[in-house]
Amino acid sequence: MTLKTLYLLLLLCAYVLTIPTLSLATAAYPTVPGTDAADCSLSDGHISLTPTRREVYGNGRIFDISHRLRTDMPAFDSSEGVGQFLWLPKSMKNGSIANSSEMKLPAHTGTHVDAPGHVFDHYFDAGFDVDTLDLEVLNGPGLLVDVPRDKNITAEVMKSLNIPKGVRRVLFRTVNTDKRLMFKKEFDSSYTGFMRDGAKWLVENTDVKLVGVDYLSVAAYDDLIPAHLVFLEGRVRKSLMNHAEIILVEGLKLDDIQLGIYSIHCLPLRLKGAEGSPIRCILIK
Ligand SMILES: *[C@@H]1O[C@H](CO)[C@@H](O)[C@H](O)[C@H]1NC(C)=O
Ligand SMILES: *[C@@H]1O[C@H](CO)[C@@H](O)[C@H](O)[C@H]1NC(C)=O
Ligand SMILES: *[C@@H]1O[C@H](CO)[C@@H](O)[C@H](O)[C@H]1NC(C)=O
C-alpha cells in the first residue's frame, strides 16, 4: 500500500469515526446482531478496515426496517432456516478478473412482499406479479402501531386500534418483535398475525392499503389462507374502480423504533412472473 493510500484510508477512518450518527445507530439497536461501529485499526503498518453495518442513517432520521438476509434466518414452515443462498462461482482467487456472486432464494424470504398471485391461481395466471404492485401504495406516509400482545389480530383488536380514516399505510408491531422471531432459525407457527375477521374488518372499515407485519406471514398460522384471501381478493374489482390495492409486506424489522407517523418507503424487485419478492423498506422521520 502506498503512503498516499494509507493517508487516504486514515482520513476516511477518522472521518467515519467522528460521524455522530454512528454511535447513535449502535445505541439505538443494542439488540440487532451484526450491527457494529466502524473499526479502523492500524497494526504492523496495515489498515484493518471493517465495514460499518447500520440500522439508522441520516442523524437518526432514517431507519432500515428490512432484515439483513442471513443463512440462519427463519424460512416458512421449516426448522432449517434459509440456508446458503449466495455462492461465489467467479472469484479473483480462482483467476477471475472480478468477484461475482450468484444467489438463489425463495421469493418469500426475509422481509418481502406478496403479490395477489401468491394465493389466487387465476391472478397468477393473469400476471398479477410483483412487477404490477403500485409504488404509490408502497411509498408514502403511514403509522407504526403496537397491537395487544395477548391476541392475534381479530376484528375486535382492529377496532380497538382506532386507526383514523385516511390512514393508508400501517405497520403492525406484535409480540413477534418482542420474541425476536425473525432472529430465530426455527420457524414458530405460534406467531401473531391476522385472523380472517381481522383482515375483513380492515378491508371494510379502514382506508389502509399497505399492511406491514413483523413475521413471515400477515395471516396467523391457523387462518393462513383465509386471511390472505381477504386481503388480496379485491384486486381486479378494485383496480377497475381505480381504487388502490392492498399490498402485504411481511417480515419487517420493527425493533427499537418509536411508535408514530413516518414516511414509509418500500421497493420490491421487478420480478416478472413472481408472486413474491424480497423488499427493502425504510422509514423516514
Ligand atoms: C474456486 O474454484 C473451485 C473449482 O472450480 C471451487 O470449488 C471453489 O469453490 C472456488 N473457490 C472460490 C473461493 O470461489
Ligand atoms: C474476491 O473474492 C475472494 C474470495 O475468492 C476474496 O478473498 C477477496 O477479498 C475478493 N476480492 C475483492 C476485491 O472483493
Ligand atoms: C395466534 O394464533 C396462533 C395460531 O395461528 C396460536 O398458536 C397463537 O397462540 C395465537 N396467539 C395468541 C397470542 O393468542
Image (cartoon, rainbow, N blue to C red):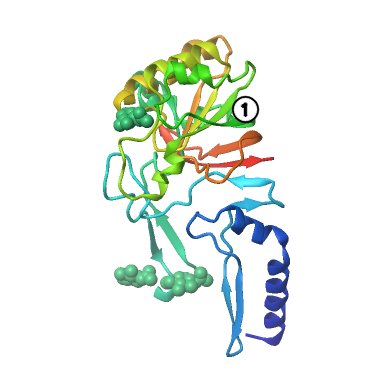
Q: Quadrant of residue 84?
A: bottom left
Where's residue 86, x and y in %?
39, 57
- Relative to 158, does residue 179 appear above or below in the rendering? below
Which quadrant is the N terminus positioned in? Answer: bottom right
Q: Quadrant of ligand 1?
A: bottom left
Residue 7 relative to residue 103: left or right: right
The amino acid type found where label 1 is placed reads Glu
Outermost residue toward the front?
150
**Secondary-structure class at tag 1:** helix
Which quarter of the figure is the C terminus placed in?
top right
Residue 239 at least partly seen: yes
* Residue 167, quarter of picture: top right
Residue placed at 51% from the left, 37% from the top? 270
Q: Residues within 10 Å of mark 1 (few under 14, many from 20)?
A: few
Image-quadrant location for residue 90: bottom left
Q: Which residue is mark 1?
A: 136
Horizontal side of 128 relative to 220 (left or right) equals: right
